[in-house]
Amino acid sequence: MPKIVDAVARRQDVVDAVFRIIASDGLERASLREVAEEANLAVGSVRHYFASSDDLLVHSFAVVIDRIVGRLEDAFSTVESVEPGTTEHDHAVLTLLGQFLPLDEELAVDACVWMAFRQAARIKPVLAEEAGRSHRAVAAVVGRLVMRLMPDGGTSQERLVTEAERLLATMDGLCMHALLQPEWMTAEGCGDVLQAHLATLGRLPTNR
Amino acid sequence: MPKIVDAVARRQDVVDAVFRIIASDGLERASLREVAEEANLAVGSVRHYFASSDDLLVHSFAVVIDRIVGRLEDAFSTVESVEPGTTEHDHAVLTLLGQFLPLDEELAVDACVWMAFRQAARIKPVLAEEAGRSHRAVAAVVGRLVMRLMPDGGTSQERLVTEAERLLATMDGLCMHALLQPEWMTAEGCGDVLQAHLATLGRLPTNR
DNA sequence: ATCTTTTTAGCACGAACGTGCTTGAACGGA
DNA sequence: TCCGTTCAAGCACGTTCGTGCTAAAAAGAT
């Protein structure tokens, strides 16, 4: 048998290069040549692991979705393991919602990449399927969280859906502002908005 | 004197072509050649009215900002002309916030273009100045609206800023979802979320 | 040492891009 | 009528892009 390399790890290296390029120069700069240079490979090598440019981008999208959803579900099991109403519970909820925001370097890269792909999916049909999966998975976690946080436990189905969509919209808007206007929307500002929103769900104290 | 055409109107025609292209095919497709074809002109003609591709894009960004901010300020003076607490007042507030969302064809185009330019401004420095102006202008209107809507009239400066940022984030998130996931976030769903958010500001009835 | 298959590297082609520059066409004032 | 400015159109150059294709290098198996 011939030369053996860890194909999975190699693919991940390339995907990491894609992430760095998107975060610093935008998705449109994530061409095969740029990605190859960032990963210290030749274009032909990248194309050995990914059939086409679209294939590379779709796979990168899937990876960032899995990472974000994975963090969210981990954080949600932490929330579930704590008694509601306690300060630990509040802290766990804030930690969960913080996974959406660019609060540190790694989260910022993921948030950039996630936003860029979702926006691109409006135009590029190859990304549409993953975009739908992303939305459904995140909405599911947020929906379960809202059900846990609402005073009546989410008795009214209709009200629950609206509150889930409201929290989801607020999170995406916060993420957008933190990425696009970091001088106006700092991590502290995000925290204030988060607390204020959670207070409107009736659990956390109203007077922040 | 030579041949005279309405240069302002011609420029606006080109900008309209830019808007249509961005809304249907994304900003990266708004090249000089594509724009010229959409406007039924030659590339050289477009370049006669705009010094460069960057010039065209920056001017288009400015136009869409002026349109959106203009609508917002018109709607705000309507809000100001009505007694707070009345149903007309509530209706005027919803009309104002509706200017953010892709509720009809024209609003949808503007929302697409606005989002696309703001995202692009993270990468393209030429767009940064207009992006900042956009954010400041919109935040000013939303801030005044929140001041009018909050029960104590916005006594606490800090609380007022947080609530303005919270409303702004929710609006941008709603706009994003309505554009990217129209099947999950319909106009009706947007209205429900809006009403729920306004209820948390303490003015509108809690029981939608 | 040789073979075989994976891995890496690179070339070449057509398409699309922005832009500098040139060339006609149009048309109001002289 | 003719002039001069403005508008419209197009060519050409250099870059970058994705991709089909070829070929050298690497290394376990024999």
Image: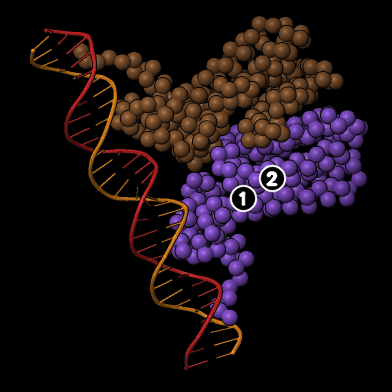
Chain colours: A brown, B purple, C orange, D red
In contact (CB < 8 Å): disc 1 and disc 2 = yes
Q: CA distance from mark 1 to mark 2?
A: 9 Å
Residue A194 can be seen, yes or no:
no
Which residue is at the front of the view, B202 or A113? A113
Query: What kind of residue is marked 1?
Result: Phe
> Residue B133: image x %, image y %?
70, 46
* Residue positioned 44% across, 35% down in the render: A30
Q: Chain of mark 2?
A: B
Q: Quadrant of residue C5?
A: top left
Query: What kind of residue is marked 2?
Result: Ser
Which residue is at the front of the view, B66 or B125? B125
Q: Which residue is mark 1?
A: B61
Crowding near the residue tagged with mark 1, few <14, some 14–19, many ≥20 C-alpha atoms within 10 Å: many
> Residue B82: image x %, image y %?
89, 48
Specify whether A60 is left or right of B94.
left
Q: Is residue B112 above or below residue A149?
A: below
Q: Which residue is mark 2?
A: B134
> Residue B132: image x %, image y %?
68, 43
Residue B121 can be seen, yes or no:
yes
* Residue positioned 65% across, 45% down in the render: B129
> Residue B120: image x %, image y %?
56, 41
Q: Chain of mark 1?
A: B
* Residue positioned 51% across, 26% down in the render: A133
Q: Where, quadrant-wise, is the N terminus of chain A in this rendering? A: top left
